Image: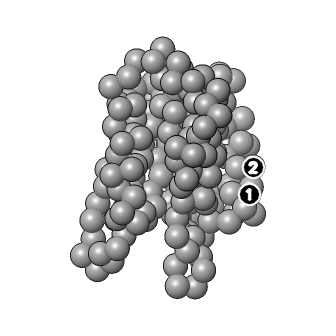
Amino acid sequence: MNLTSFSDFCAQAVKEGMLFYYTGEYSKNVIAAMSDTLRHRLESTSLSAPARRKIFSTFVEMSQNIMHYVDPDQDGIKVGALAVGHNQGKYYVMCGNPIRVEYVDRVKEKVEPLRSMTVDEIKSAYRAQLRNEDHEQQDTLSKGAGLGFLTVARDASEPIEYQIVYRSERQEYAEFYLRAAI
């Protein structure tokens, strides 16, 4: 790598496919600043408006999942990572964050079925969830209407991918990674 200026650094990052990357503290202000930054970066690409909307929508859903479902650390800070990039003609949005081990099965139950559903099935499930007035009684942990993973899967151009990683140093937490190709 031969970088002589910040412009060279930015050009190299774009050449290598990274459009946006953040890891660190999550708060409403951080998410707002990241959203503005990503929106401007997407506007500078040659992507169609629908593609930009899908990338941005997925980014917002993943950001909100980190903000709403990650437990604060001992200093009261919620931490996660989020990236937007492109590789082999597709854009992708990825996130990573800690989740409590007792929530792993619940996350798998929500994500795994989406991997084998058709786009029409995902859209149908999304519409059904919008009409579900009993959501709060069915899922007391969800802060929204349970639409986050459905939104990500709906906007993805291929099945979403996820991984759960267990670390021995923090046994009460696992790491959750989610990737959507747009």
State the residue in front, 154 or 121: 121
Horizontal and vertical percent position of residue 64: 62, 52
Badge 2 crowding class, 10 Å Cα cut-off, few under 14, some 14 to 19, many 20 or more, is: few
Seen from this angle, which residue lies furthest top? 120
Q: Who's the residue at 68% across and 66% down the image?
A: 27
Amino acid type of disc 2? Answer: Asp
Q: Is mark 2 on a helix, strand or loop?
A: helix
Residue 166: mark in rendering: none
Name the disc covering residue 33, or none.
1
Residue 21 can be seen, yes or no: no
- Measure the alpha-carbon separation of dots 1 and 2: 5 Å
Q: In which quarter of the image is residue 111?
A: top left
- Point 40% across, 49% down: residue: 107
Residue at figure coordinates x 68%, y 57% from the top left: 31
Q: Where is residue 125 in the image (x, y as percent from the top left)?
A: 51, 24
Relative placement, left or right, of 166 versus 51 is: left
Which quadrant does the N terminus fall into? bottom left
User: Is mark 1 in CB contact (under 8 Å) with mark 2?
Assistant: yes
Secondary structure type for disc 1: helix
Residue placed under numbered mark 2 in the picture: 36
Q: Which of 82 and 126 is in front in this view?
A: 126
In the figure, is residue 65 to the left or right of 178? right
- Classify residue 167 by image quadrant: bottom left
* Residue 34 appears in the figure: yes
Q: Which residue lies furthest to the bottom in this view?
A: 75
Residue lying furthest left = 168
* Residue 42 place in picture, x, y as percent: 66, 37
